[in-house]
Image: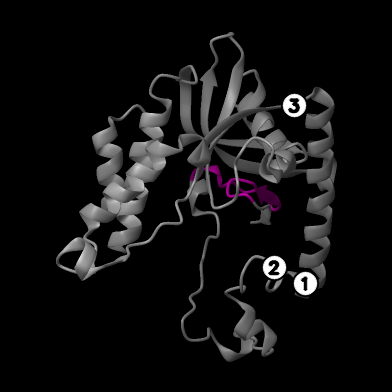
Amino acid sequence: KGQPLESAVALARSSITDPVDAELTACMVAGWEWRWREAPIGRCLAAESTWRVRVGRGRGAFTAAGKIDAVYELPSGEVAVVENKTTREDITPLSDYWRRLNIDRQISWYIMGARELGFPASTVIYDAARVPGLRPRLLSRKKDGDGGRESLEQYAARVMEDITGRPDWYYARHEIPRLESDIAEARQEMVHWHRILRDYRRSNRWPRNSDACMRWGRCPYFGPCADGYDPITQGVPSGYRVVDDVNAELQETRSEDADSIAAGSGAAQTE
């Protein structure tokens, strides 16, 4: 958004409750600015812009909505959507992280959304930042003097030393281009998913994929789900809450449409 680094670091520290995570995030922000200071993407045309587009025809039509991190004009004059992502995955050039993006439909949706906003985007710049795996360590009394756990200042200094020592391990940018045929295919796929979601809603049946319960770590809903807990008849279980709007960031896109898909947070959901 064009704010100075100090503002971004201060926001990182103030918006996260855990002091270690807050310091880690501040280091990532400062490291990102240091890494790309001499390599700007181009001229920023828009930031955190919400888009909405009508998809489909007749009674099967619906509204798709999402939020784009940024739109830039590249030095070549080409217009690109810029996606800022944090990850714990390997983001080195030959990793599967980048290969997967070749078939990521969300990228095509973002280009579609940027065009709806009036920007003739034809490509996406993926700006990825890897989360450091370093945590505060216990200090040796013999080696470090006082012993105990290292301070936040010591921890931050160690994280920054690792970031600046191997910047390509932590930060990477790649262009993910799209053909017009890719955009058309993504639009048609969105229509297909909407049909499936509409059928689920009508029958009030939502199939579960038990193979995914532990695939990316233990699912936070595994306990109630595996125990057959029904929050409709049994109430909300302890430790959970009802979210009235799963896509609050798209509040301004609300309309009287009966059917819509929100694609701003990495997953399509009906409203």
Q: Which residues are magenta?
A: 252-266
Q: How is the image coloured?
A: one colour
Disc number for residue 215? 2
**Numbered disc total:** 3
Residue drawn at (47%, 86%), measured in percent from left and top? Answer: 238
Judged from this view, the residue extending furthest toward the top is: 76
Residue drawn at (68%, 49%), measured in percent from left and top? Answer: 261
Q: Nearer the viewer, residue 46 or 84?
A: 84
Q: Position of residue 239 (x, y in %)?
A: 46, 81
Q: Which residue is mark 3?
A: 178
Is residue 257 a member of the stretch shown in magenta? yes
Judged by its main secondary structure, the magenta piece is loop
Relative to 134, residue 36 above or below:
above
Q: Which residue is mark 1?
A: 211
Q: Nearer the viewer, residue 167 or 99?
A: 167
Q: Secondary structure at mark 2?
A: loop
Residue 186 figure quarter: top right
How far is mark 1 from mark 3, CA to CA? 31 Å
Q: Are marks 1 and 2 in contact (CB under 8 Å)?
A: yes
Please report whichever mark, 2 or 3, sits nearer to the chain's N-terminal start: 3
- Residue type at mark 2 is Arg
Is residue 40 a member of the stretch shown in magenta? no
